[in-house]
Every structure is written in structure tokens, then in C-alpha cells.
Image (spheres, rainbow, N blue to C red):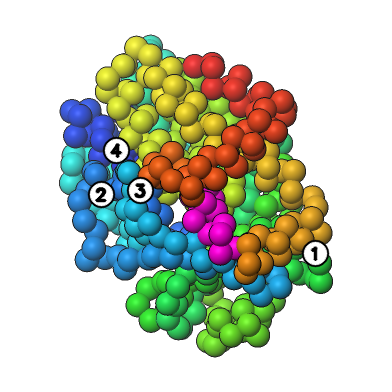
Amino acid sequence: MVVIGAGPAGSVAAKVLAEGGAKVALVDKARFPRDKACGDVVGPRAVSLLSDRYGSFAAWTKPVGDMDVVGPGGGRVRLPARPGRDFPAGGWAVPRTILDKLLYDEAVGSGAEPLHGRFGGMVSAGGLQVVNLDGGRRLSAEFVIGADGATSAVASSNGMVDPARVLWGFATRCYLEQEVPVPLISFWEEAPGRSFPGYGWLFPGPDGYANAGLGIGTGHSREGASRAVHRLDSFLDHLRRAGHVGAAAPARRMGGWLKMGMVGTRPARGRILLVGDAAGLVNPLQGEGIAQAVGSAVAASEAILSDTGNAAGTYMAWLRKEAAFQGSTAVLHQALLPHPRVVSALSRVLTWNALGSRLGEPWGLYWNDLTGGAHPGPARTMAATAGTAVRVLTSTSAARRSLAKELRWA
């Protein structure tokens, strides 16, 4: 087996395959440890998945509990961190330099062979997938797992993505020298009454530092990503005026692409399976991808180990469950993106203190795709009702129909 990309999705896939007795090559163009643009917060669903496979990462992480959402008018909603039936209360703050290296080392320790190289295309020959790497190297494998991120070369070289239909996003972040007691999401207005097409954040970072960033949705075009880069200083000034930030903005920043909602991507074809960001498995509401990366990596690897003759079909069956949330919220994202005044008004209403105090818990469940694993109660009922309403309202959209068609095919 060959796994292209050694981020969380690739490293988890390689570990599961190696532990299942497969011979695995884990290929990445970078040498670890390496940095990655991210908010550095691992949510409850991802914590549960990683803890089941790896045990405790407590020595390298700091716990993250409640989260605050601040609206354009200054209203604040607390999203409480409460345990569910299959997820803990809260998540982890951990830099990607640390998390990715831990997962990479676990994969190698489980028997995956690490290879440093750049993917250069592949062909099918004699029932095998022949992978070309730079320097003229070739690898032959029964299966290839593409875990090489939003701009996946595995996906594009095998005709598994239509870039013009993908729902793109871009995020940029920096580290500030200050502590953050409670993670904060900010719906920010670039101009009065006109919401920025995304959101900003201020999260706990490495010891003594905060992770601050700005994410933007760019729709079906990759133009417009520079807007997040150019507006980051203005957003930090906004946080400073609001009293959230006191540290000076550093010169060093890092950015990265997001491919959300599985839109425009065929995640499996024969013996090629895409996982994580490569499959578009990023939450369209808030950009989280770690939980989806780990979950899809496990699902794809176990499908290969248990159902070699129909691994793509088995993996697609797992993805269809993810598509209920991913597809409907992708359409919601698309519908709101061109209407900054509507988003601004909506975010002001949702963060109005009198209303927000009642919405905090169900908002957190739906926003973080935790509804299905929550304990029964009013918050879960409200979140499930919202999810059902969005699915019904988006059921006839072209994006939903296209996604359903892609997930039936293997």
C-alpha cells in the first residue's frame, strides 16, 4: 500500500494498515516535524477518535473547554463544553508541528516505511497502481490512499476532482505572545453592516502564545484568498480595540487552502481512495478537518483490510453518513457567502445576549457536528431540528444531487 501525504489523515491510515499486516509506504514531500496552517485546536470528536487509537496525548496538549463566539455588535455567546455519549467535554490545543509529528512517529513505529519524496503521477498496470516519485523512483501497490491535502495531486491526476465545482476556503494564521483563557470566534465586519465572508479566531497556542487567524470562503473560485492575508492586520486591530489582544502582530504568517463539504470530489475510484482534506472532508461551517481526517483514514484503511475486492464501495458507504452533514452545510455556506449584509444581521441576532444564552449549547452541537453523539435533551433536540431543517431545505440543490451521485459510484 502507498499513502501519499503524512499529515493526520495519512499517518493514521498508514498506522491502521501497518497494524493490520499490510506493507505500507508513507510518502511526504516534507520532513517532519514541519509546520502547518491551522487553528491548533482539536475538537471533541477528534479527541475521542485519537484517544481510542493512541491513548492519552496529555503530555503534549492543553485542554480546551468552553468557547466564546463574539458578534459584530459585541454580543457574546458561550458554547459550553459538555460530554456526549461518544465524545469528551472539550478538546485539545496542540500545535500542528507537535501533533503531526506524534502521529507520523506512531505510523512509522507501527511498521510503515517513511519515504521523503514528491508525488509525480501514477498509472495502473497489471492490477497494481504504479506511483511515480521525483528522482525517477517508482512504487507499486494494490491500493493508493491520497492524503495530500486540499490541492491533492492524487485527486487531480486521476480525474477525481473538478476544481471549478469545489467549495474553496483559505485560512491564514500567526502566533501572538499572549495567553488566551477561553478560545474565541469572531464574526467580524469589514465595513459597517457588511460581514467578512468567513470568521476570525483567537485560540490558545504554544505555551505563552495565542493562535490568531482569519478564514475566508471563496466559493467555487480560488481567487480572493489574498483578501484573508491582506485583512489579517485589520482583524487583529479589531481584536485589539475590543480588548482581546494586546501583543504586537508578528511578521511571520502561514496560510493554507481548505476544500469543504466534499463538493466536487469523487473520494474513491477503484483502488484509489481519498481521505481528509483531499476528499473535501472539512466542516463547511467552521473549517474543522482533524476529526474528519482521522475518521476517514480509519474507514478507508479498514475497508482495504476487510473488503479488498470492494474497498471503494465499503468506504463510500461510510462517506454517505458523513455526507448528510457535509453536503447540507456546504449548500448553506454557499447560500450565505454572497450576502454579507444578511450574514452580518444574522450573526448580530445569534449573538444577542438575550437569545445567545439559550442557543449556546445547541449551537455548539450543530456547529461542531456533534449532534448525533450528544446526550438526549433540549439542546440535542434543538440542534437535530436545525440539522433536519437545513437538510430538507437543501435537498433539491444541485450540489446535494451531485454529491449523492458521486457517493453511489465506486
Q: Position of residue 11 (x, y in %)?
A: 32, 44
Image point (80%, 71%), residue name: 191
In primary-sequence order, the first of circles 1 and 2 is 2
- Between the C-alphas of marks 4 and 2, the distance is 17 Å
- Residue 84 badge: 3
Q: Nearer the viewer, mark 4 or mark 2?
A: 2
- Residue type at mark 2? Ser
Q: Nearer the viewer, mark 4 or mark 3?
A: 3
Say above or below: 75 vs 237.
above
- Residue 14 badge: 4
- Between the C-alphas of marks 1 and 2, the distance is 41 Å
Image point (38%, 81%), residue name: 208
**Is residue 128 shown left or right of residue 279?**
left
**Is residue 53 shown left or right of residue 145?**
left
- Residue type at mark 4? Ala
Q: Nearer the viewer, mark 2 or mark 3?
A: 3
- Residue 209 badge: none
Q: Nearer the viewer, residue 10 or 394?
A: 394
Q: Nearer the viewer, mark 3 or mark 1?
A: 3
- Residue 51 badge: 2
Report if residue 165 is visible in the image: yes
Image point (18%, 39%), residue name: 111
Write the start and end of the magenta stretch as one range: 356-370
Label 1, on which residue?
A: 194
